[in-house]
Image (tube, rainbow, N blue to C red):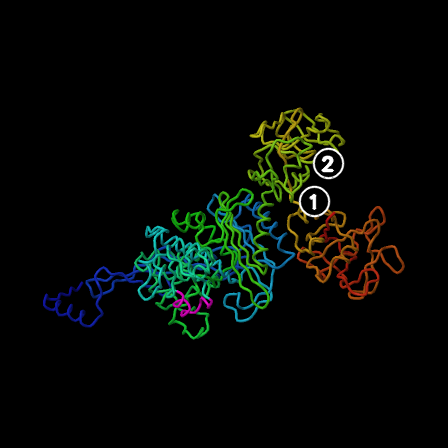
Amino acid sequence: MKRWYIGLGAFATLLSFHLDARATCTEGMKQDCISASGCPGEKECILGFDWGTCEYIPGAKISCTAPTATCGNTAGTRTCDEYGNAGACTATQSFCNTNDCDAVNYAELSSLANRIEDHFNPYGGTQLAVVRKQSNGQLCTVTRNHGFAVSAWDVYNHSTAISTMTYDIPMNIWSVSKALTGARMAEVLAALQISPQAAIGPYIPSWLSPGPGVEKITFEELLEHKSGMPQPAGDCNVPSVFHDWLEEGCEIHFITQECLNNGTDEYNSMTYVLLQVLIANMTTNLSQEMTNYGKSDAWTAGKLLDLHVRGSYFMGEAAYSGCTHTLSHSPFAYPPNATSTTAGYQYGTDFNTGCGTGGFALTAYDLAKTFSLLYAGDIMQQEAVDMVFDSGYGMDWAGTTIGGTPFVMKGGGFETSGTEQQSILFVFKDHPGTVVVQNTNIHSDDNVGMLVNAWDEARLCDNGVPAEALGNQMWGCPGSESYANKATLCGSETHVCTPAEWEARRFSGAAGTPDHIYWTDYGSTELGYSGSSSNCSARYVNASPAGTTCGSSGNAPMRICSGTSDAEGNACNWTGCKYESSTNTNYWGGCLGNTTAGALCCANRPCADGTAEQSWGTNMYGCAGSVSYANRESLCGHRMHVCTAEEWNAKRASTAPTHIYWTDNGASDLGFSGSGSNNCAAKAYPSTGTTSCGTLDSNGDSTRPMRVCSGTSDAEGNTCTWTGCKYESETAANYLGGCVGNANAGALCCPD
């Protein structure tokens, strides 16, 4: 091996050359670096004149587009190694509703989502997300989407209006952006150990000229819209309006006439612009983990999202608002998707004042996830979490309750072209916390009221006791009521489940294990017992073989038993019994002398599976499925019946079916006349010129009658040989069709 030596004098000369020829740096100074694969790292200044090699961060994640969409989501991440190499792109978060939900949380959140839909669907569209962090650390997310038209002004990165919103389009959340700014302000105050009651004076940047009284305003007063500063008449996005407003000021301790006229407790969007400026100024010297405004984006709420949640939970780059990203060193440069000039101010050179108060764009899905993580304490220290969710910084309402549940709420919206697009955020402080976000075209006043009602109904139990989720759209309501009073325990949107509903809906395993003793509703025939204590069944007294009565004139029937007793003082002499001839032990028991229990409550849903694929107002629902005509009723929910062809004809209006559905033809048969699709009619059979669809039952009626057809086939595998048929003597086609050889369909369901 050859060795090379250099003399001391030569080394000094070489060192001098380096110092003269290269930019100097301070020894120990660190600088960001990035690999060819995009992996982040850091290099350190050596000997005051040379940057060392880049030390990459193993485990760092960079965004990418996944090669295959999963449930509509292509957002992904690549994981970096210590050499700066990025691994394969994998999806960061599936968009499947049930992917991360356990059975209990999915049942409860689905119930809430369904009730919100009941209230909102008759009035407009909604992009809905309901999120809760589970005990296993995963987020359970239930989404709903009913498309509605929006203007280009309301949607991220779109130059034209969108006729139908879908779940994956970020929508302008308007003033809900203040909730993000409030959270970021809380994070900064907690990190710097500054009291919210501290005056803002020492933290106002030197390039601003605040007017009288401004320096005495506290952070809390800004956050709660109690600064005494008037709301300016001009646009918050125009820097000159912000400067003029700030310089005018307001002496809150010696209130001027102007401030007195405007009030000291007035909603003021411009105060959140001032908060944005304060945050940027205060975070200059914080560690890089908190922020780095000198090198990348600078919007306060956007930075919070960028630091904490985007890489793991967001759908992708489209989740960013125009208010988030800029490469300018100015904290408030105009966003990349802005026009080249806005109100006369140049993109990239002037600060965009409005981003702290409104204009952020997110899907309901992403915004709900963010606040679920915030509430769970995954993003900020507890002191900051308390500022947001107890003090309500950034929110409209805090310390308010619905049905005994405290919540915080923020809403926002903007009216354009005669419609008002709205975004609304609710964080219910139940354990462990439930977050609801809606992007919708319904006015916020109605929006809040309907959401409040939906949450109240989702409590499910009429006595206000939290329900025990035990099955698909089925909950246990603990109590100690007589059999005659069992229905008093169920809320207005539920009924006491039948024994058959318990058998069909119960979750398997631990999720379907009751913690209390519950009544079911046996109907007109008592549910007695058979067998012995070690080998028993719940059996109707008119069955064959017959069950034995439990006595008490039918008021102490077999019931669902968690054990021989429960916390409410109810009792079961026998436990571990089966139901009728079933071989499964599904927690039946009782019964002699056991006269009280809680109640099993099932949702009054239009469709038996809890999901209506279509609705025509509140009078008719499409329940997709693939069952025989004889089993059509099985698809309809409690207190619902299969609609008649006459009801379909009267209630349909202009909405077309998206699935194939049975109607109920009563005592008659629904046959056909005509020669083929678009030249046919569904008519009562027998009648002149009408042909039976064949495959007759014991009454001589077809088991494959004409039905409602969305086309020649649907997603469930049902078929219609003919389509576009009229009803009876109607002149217009009414989506009827069928029928020879078409054995299965879903069902149209109408209220009893």
Report how far apart the C-alphas of labels 2 and 1 lie in the structure: 13 Å
Residue sitting at x 46%, y 71%: 338
Left or right of 613? Residue 268 is left
Which amino acid, mark 1?
His
Look at the image and tell me whether residue 13 can be seen.
Answer: yes
Q: Which label belongs to residue 638?
A: 1
Which amino acid, mark 2?
Gly
Secondary structure beneath disc 2? loop
Left or right of 189? Residue 742 is right
Evaluate if marks 2 and 1 touch, with contact meaning CB atoms under 8 Å apart: no
Secondary structure beneath disc 1? loop
Look at the image and tell me whether residue 82 can be seen.
Answer: no
Judging by the rendered image, the residue that carries numbered circle 2 is 523
Q: Which residues are magenta?
A: 233-245
Residue sitting at x 58%, y 30%: 568
Asked if residue 167 is among those painted magenta in the image, a careful observer would answer no
